[in-house]
Amino acid sequence: MGQYDIGSALVYDRAAHEAGVFDRFDFILEACGTSHRLLPTIPVLPPATREQMPPADLVAFCLDHGIKAVRACPTAHNFICDRHSMGRLCTQLQARRMPLIHSSIGLREHPYKHQPPWHDLRDLALAFPDMPVIVLHTGMMQGRNLFTLLEECPNVMADLSCASFQYVEEVVAHFGSARLVMASHFPAEDPGLYTTWLNYAKVDADVRANIAGDNLRRLLAAVV
């Protein structure tokens, strides 16, 4: 974090992510307890599998332990993330305005060739308009699909992984800087890939500050 001047970060347990551990969060909570700069997130699954506590209890657990965002990784964890499979959980998240971080990239998939499940994302975002949905790994050449989603779903935000020409500038011009967030994708990737695009984007300083961290800070502050 010091190498790239990252002041704070939403973090996750990479080993648990790869191993498929969904009912123990002691490691991530203990790690984040060592520094106020580390903000914990946990993975979520469709409630029907009963691999996690019931949705209301899970969200209450999150709030009791300082967890203000959760992660859905449908490809890595083999489920469909739409209103049907995730509806009961998203109802609870929406009531608390807790962000759902969505990453559909596979464990060994190349991020630039990735294509998210746009129909599922649209379905989920439209069904829960007051639940922030943060899309990570939007794919390198998926700008047309992403822009369509951003236009139709005001509650959707995206990271900087869409490398279409002048992506940052175009999103800011069409939708405003509030729709973008900086994600380092560490440890799977080098954070420099994304800090560089933001540092050299032709945008005002306040816009750069929003994307670099202020947008996320406002989202987390709004969790009730």
Image (cartoon, grey):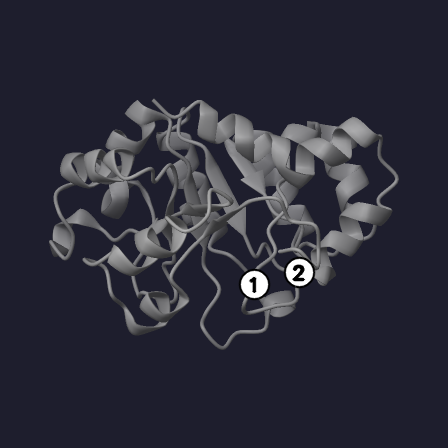
Tell me the residue that label 1 is attached to.
186
Percent of width and height locating residue 156: 52, 35
- The image quadrant where one finds the C terminus is top left
Which residue is labeled 2 in the image? 191
Residue type at mark 2: give it: Pro
Q: Considering only vertical position in the picture, is 36 above or below 190? A: above
Q: Quadrant of residue 212?
A: top right
The image shows residue 88 at horizontal and vertical percentages of 20, 37
Q: Position of residue 83 (x, y in %)?
A: 30, 40
* The one of 9 and 143 positioned closer to us in this rendering: 9
* Visible residue check, residue 191: yes
Badge number at residue 154: none
Task: Look at the image and tell me in which quarter the N terminus lies.
Answer: bottom right
Which mark is first along the chain, 1 or 2?
Answer: 1
| 5 relative position to 59: left or right | right
Residue 160 horizontal side relative to residue 127, left or right: right
- Left or right of 189? Residue 27 is left
Q: Secondary structure at mark 2?
A: loop
Q: Position of 162 compared to 183: left or right?
A: right
Residue drawn at x 50%, y 42% as measured from the top left:
134
In the figure, 160 relative to 75: above or below?
above
- Cβ–Cβ under 8 Å for marks 2 and 1: yes
